[in-house]
Image: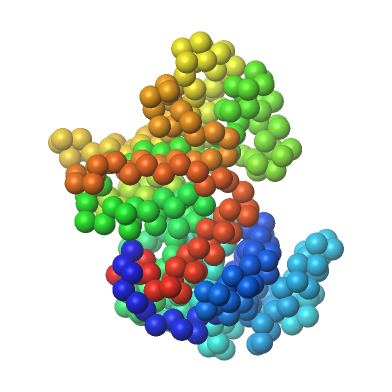
Amino acid sequence: MDTEAVSYTHLTLPTIFGYGGVGKALVRLIEEKREELKGEGLKPEVNYVIEYYGGIYAKEGIELAKLIEFTQSGERDITRYEGGSKEIDVDTVIENGDVDLAVIMTPTNKETGEPGLGFIRKLLGAGINVVTSDKGPVLLAYEELKELAKEKGVQLGIGCTTGGALPTVNGGMMDMAGAKIKSIEGVLNGTTNFILKDMEERGVSYEEALKKAQEDGIAETNPSLDVEGYDTATKLLILTKVHMGITKSIEEVEIEGITKVTQEDIRKAKEEGKKYRLVGRTEVGEDGEVKIRVSPEKVGQENIFYSVEGKNKAVRYTSDTLGDLVMIGGASGTTPAAASILRDVINIHRGYKFVR
């Protein structure tokens, strides 16, 4: 991530695509941090909030406090808000030509990348900076999108896609600059970490720990992507692509989730002074063969992942010249995810180059 200055003097806060949990959290953060953002030289304005069925547009900026109140009332259709219309979409943004940055928080589709991929292509092609939390477009078309951003002289921030608040992408780009990353390993899913921790502490079964995670809003109603290891695999594939230049498909990853970890497994590990963690790992053998695997592993106190508790995550990069870089933290949740998006927005405004 190059710190050479880029002139974004009048960069406004983003057009928002996707108004789910993270989108709402981002709007709250922008409103709460209005003065801090002004101190950064950012205009604390959001001109558009867009969903798949329409959106809201206000030329002088949407009144975020009122929008928050509106959605807290239980109203789900944002087109009913002042300035709302079923006709507002990505083409409206491009045709109006009055924004310079968009945030894409569309649901991840790892098969097609849509609708986020189409949005990002259009926005970058129109010379609009993009920050995204959607893993699908990055997994399937990162090189294409990176080249498009480079061609148009804009930036593409993807920091939220692989660890939310944990700066797995940004740290690898900036702090491993000049080194060759030889391996990546990480605990990249906060939901599975929370479940395993609950099984350890309360002595409950996987099913009971999952139920509590769902009741607490940590696990989704359908948690399969998390607990079966696919979320970790997707994040690992993105990190492998971005930092090692290796492109693999999800079918080429050996994946085993935590659904078969029993209370008996947890008890035996505890007797050995160990804990279970869902670990993703990319390694390159001496013969050049790339192995990417996700599986539950027993780790002892000497292992860095032993102390990764609850909803936190961790990553370790091993390089040829800079040794190991380890990052731990970055709690899961809608607010930390929104904060990681805002971090990329601020860094683009400061002139950091995610795309060089």
Left or right: residue 162 versus residue 16 is left
Instruction: In this rendered view, identify the residue nearer to me: 81 or 89.
Output: 81
Residue appearing at x 33%, y 58% in the figure: 174
Residue lying at the far right in this picture: please name it: 73
Q: Residue at x 74, y 82 (%)?
A: 83
Q: Residue at x 72, y 39 (%)?
A: 216
Query: Residue 78 in the image: x percent, y percent?
Result: 74, 71
Q: Is residue 220 visible?
A: yes
Q: Is residue 156 left or right of residue 231?
A: left
Q: Is residue 17 left or right of residue 302?
A: right
- Image quadrant in which the N terminus is located: bottom left
Q: Position of residue 295 (x, y in %)?
A: 43, 30
Determine the residue located farthest toward the left in the rendered image. Answer: 287
- Residue 104 percent location from the top left of the image: 54, 66
Q: Is residue 121 visible?
A: no
Question: Residue 123 in the image: x percent, y percent?
Answer: 47, 76
Asked which quadrant contains residue 198, the reply is top right
Q: Nearer the viewer, residue 267 or 273?
A: 273
The correct choice, above or below, for 343 with respect to 236 in the image is below
